[in-house]
Amino acid sequence: MSYDARFRVWRGNGDGGELVDYTVEVNEGEVVLDIIHRLQATQAGDLAVRWNCKAGKCGSCSAEVNGMPRLMCMTRMSTFAEDETVTVTPMRTFPVIRDLVTDVSFNYEKARQMPSFEPPPGLAHGEYRMAQVDVERSQEFRKCIECFLCQDTCHVVRDHEDNKDAFAGPRFFIRAAELDMHPLDARTDRVQLARTEQGIGLCNITKCCTQVCPEHIAITDNAIIPMKERVAGDRYDPLVWLGRKIGLRKT
């Protein structure tokens, strides 16, 4: 069973653009990305869109559908009424390159600033040992497909461009939390880095990042809040302060 749907798709580049109306055929079982591909094939051959796997695992086809950051390949047309206009726009937080394609290099710059895993001294490769509970705790964070929807929806950078220099964003807070919780990571300053360089204090835990995560990672509850608690304990715990004063702690 098929029907004709009304689509509004943003067309333009970094200098500006507009929403353009289209009427496109929709077939049973299709997703938004299917319709965008049909639109390319039949009406707008120069429409720019980024995609790869079409299986919700590469994170390439991120966009905003009716104002909600989503993966187009995982957004079924059956979630919309047949008479509803579906609006597809590029991710708002990042600069537009063309049409639905945005420049997400901000995220790669933040990734380069993240200190990598530091193996413990005295252990060779193959000698690392971890308890299963520690493996399972960090496994959730490794499900991230780097679609950057959490980065897009985070109002700290979505609504305040000037925060980007000081704020890493939820995708990299889960990386910081994963490494800080790792029993074999030898770095001891990840909590301080989260506070001073990654800007975790700017996050006010609205959970919008968790709501848009296609992998259902509990970003706020399992990563950001524990890191915030570690930051608060490290900075304001009187016993930690006393330990520094009498030389029992160096940081």
Image: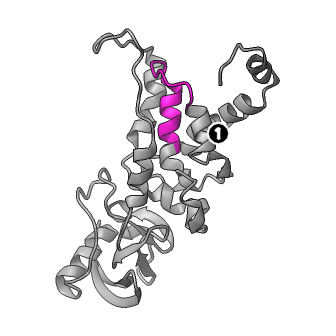
Left-right relation of 42 to 207? left
**Pick the front one: 75 or 209:** 209
Classify 223 as above or below 186. below
> Residue 83: percent from the left, percent from the top?
44, 84
Query: Residue drawn at (80%, 19%), measured in percent from left and top?
Result: 242
Residue 1 visible to an observer of this rendering: no
Report the span colored magenta.
173-189
Residue 27 found in image quarter: bottom left
Residue under circle 1?
Answer: 225
> Residue 1: percent from the left, percent from the top?
27, 75
**Pick the front one: 107 or 187:** 187
> Residue 72: percent from the left, percent from the top?
35, 65
Q: Secondary structure at mark 1?
A: helix
Kind of residue at badge 1: Ile
Residue 36 found in image quarter: bottom left
Query: Residue drawn at (59%, 61%), measured in percent from left and top?
Result: 163
**Pick the front one: 146 or 162:** 162
The answer to whether residue 112 is magenta is no
Left-right relation of 220 to 175? right
- The residue carrying pointer 1 sits among few (fewer than 14), some (14 to 19) or many (20 or more) residues within 10 Å by Cα, namely some
Classify 113 as above or below 99. above
Query: In the rendered view of the protein, which quadrant contains the C terminus?
Result: top right
Query: Residue drawn at (26%, 63%), measured in percent from left and top?
Result: 51
The answer to whether residue 182 is magenta is yes
Classify 74 as above or below 43. above
Query: Residue drawn at (71%, 13%), measured in percent from left and top?
Result: 248
**Pick the front one: 139 or 188:** 188
